[in-house]
Image (cartoon, rainbow, N blue to C red):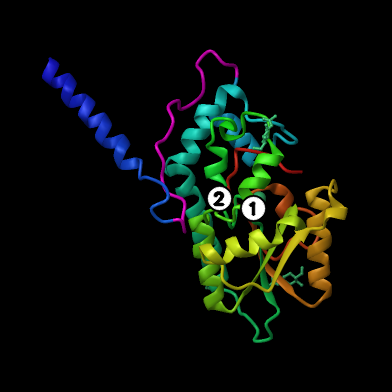
Amino acid sequence: MAVALLFLCFLVLATTTSDAVIAHSDPQIIQLLRPRAGVAGHPDSEINCLSWRLAVETNNIRNWDLVPETCEDYVGNYMLGKQYRLDCEAVADIAIEYAENLTIPDDGKSIWVFDIDETAFSNLPYYARPSVGFGAKKYNSTAFGEYIQEADVPALPASLRLYRNLVKLGIKSVFLTGSSERYREAREENLKKVGYYTWEKLILKPISEKGTSSVYFKSKERTKLVNEGYRIVGNIGDQWSDIIGTNVGNRTFKLPDPMYYVG
Ligand SMILES: *[C@@H]1O[C@H](CO)[C@@H](O)[C@H](O)[C@H]1NC(C)=O
Ligand SMILES: *[C@@H]1O[C@H](CO)[C@@H](O)[C@H](O)[C@H]1NC(C)=O
Ligand SMILES: *[C@@H]1O[C@H](CO)[C@@H](O)[C@H](O)[C@H]1NC(C)=O
Ligand SMILES: [Mg+2]
């Protein structure tokens, strides 16, 4: 009995550690971390966390503020485990297949719009902090700003793979983010560091436009691009506000993000 129990413990340990590749061994990509306990939320809670996540991904629940406290472990488990990575890779597979099918004129005007946070980059090292709780605790913009300034944010591997394929296909990338112009230097350094080594434009939100909605800002900037003669053949983001509005592009792709909502 004791031996069987010991063996069981070993098995559990072996499976969790195989998932728990230590971060920082390769700063270029996000690594699997030890998934947190808790799968579907607390059984006594009225919220089913899987249903909640589906509702936020489909934009049925909008303008939500924080991840329900009862779903903190569930969201943490999803984000740090395999499923989030698989879901992102599936999005990239579809986007790459779509892009490979396009006929790209040789005029350098075909572009792909990438959002930055939770799209080009993954902020999991920040959101996994106990003080943040995968979006279940109040967001601290000062702490997040400091984290951005370090310019050490890992790439979201699926998006980097899409980017590399687009480069090969002759589709130029435009990074369009609602994060502030004040982070331009850090973002440039960070993009290059993780492998996004070239882009057509990097558009950040001017300090004077702080407070305007993401849908408004991004629509306006995409319209400018179209007026400059660019063709937005694809557009990818983790927020619905990245992919709705005007001039969204010929096809849009939504990455998962159950950690926060930007309208
Ligand atoms: C790519 O083109 C082929 C041939 O025209 C078509 O069968 C396929 O559905 C297209 N795939 C996508 C993802 O558009
Ligand atoms: C927010 O983060 C800053 C910088 O890390 C810290 O000094 C401050 O105490 C935090 N504020 C709250 C309310 O936790
Ligand atoms: C892409 O979208 C533009 C603007 O809506 C449209 O004019 C064009 O025909 C679309 N191209 C393709 C290949 O669907
Ligand atoms: Mg984003």
On screen, residue 49 versus residue 24, left or right, reads right
Q: Which residue is drawn at 52% across and 37% down?
A: 128
- In the image shown, does 81 or 24 lie closer to the viewer? 24
- Whether residue 42 is in magenta: the answer is yes
Q: Where, quadrant-wise, is the C terminus in this rendering?
A: top right
Secondary element at tag 2: loop
Majority SS type along the magenta span: loop
- Which residue is labeled 2 in the image? 122
Asked whether residue 160 appears in the rendered view, the answer is yes
Mark 1 is surrounded, within 10 Å at the Cα level, by few (under 14), some (14 to 19) or many (20 or more) other residues, namely: some
x, y percentage for residue 187?
64, 60
Cβ–Cβ under 8 Å for marks 2 and 1: no
- Which residue is labeled 1 in the image? 149
Q: Residue furthest bottom?
A: 106
From the viewer's perspective, is residue 204 above or below residue 224? above
x, y percentage for residue 207?
83, 54
The amino acid pointed to by label 1 is Gln
- Whether residue 48 is in magenta: the answer is no
Q: Residue furthest right?
A: 208
Q: Where, quadrant-wise, is the N terminus in this rendering?
A: top left
The amino acid pointed to by label 2 is Ser
Q: Residue at x 51, y 18 (%)?
A: 42
x, y percentage for residue 67?
63, 30
**What is the distance, in whole Å, between disc 2 and disc 1 at their CAs?**
15 Å
Tell me the quarter of the picture where residue 136 sits: top right
- In the image shown, does 183 or 166 lie closer to the viewer? 183
* N-terminal-most mark, 2 or 1: 2
Q: What stretch is highlighted in magenta?
A: 27-46
Closer to viewer: mark 2 or mark 1:
1
Mark 2 is surrounded, within 10 Å at the Cα level, by few (under 14), some (14 to 19) or many (20 or more) other residues, namely: some
Asked whether residue 59 appears in the rendered view, the answer is no
From the viewer's perspective, is residue 192 above or below residue 177? below
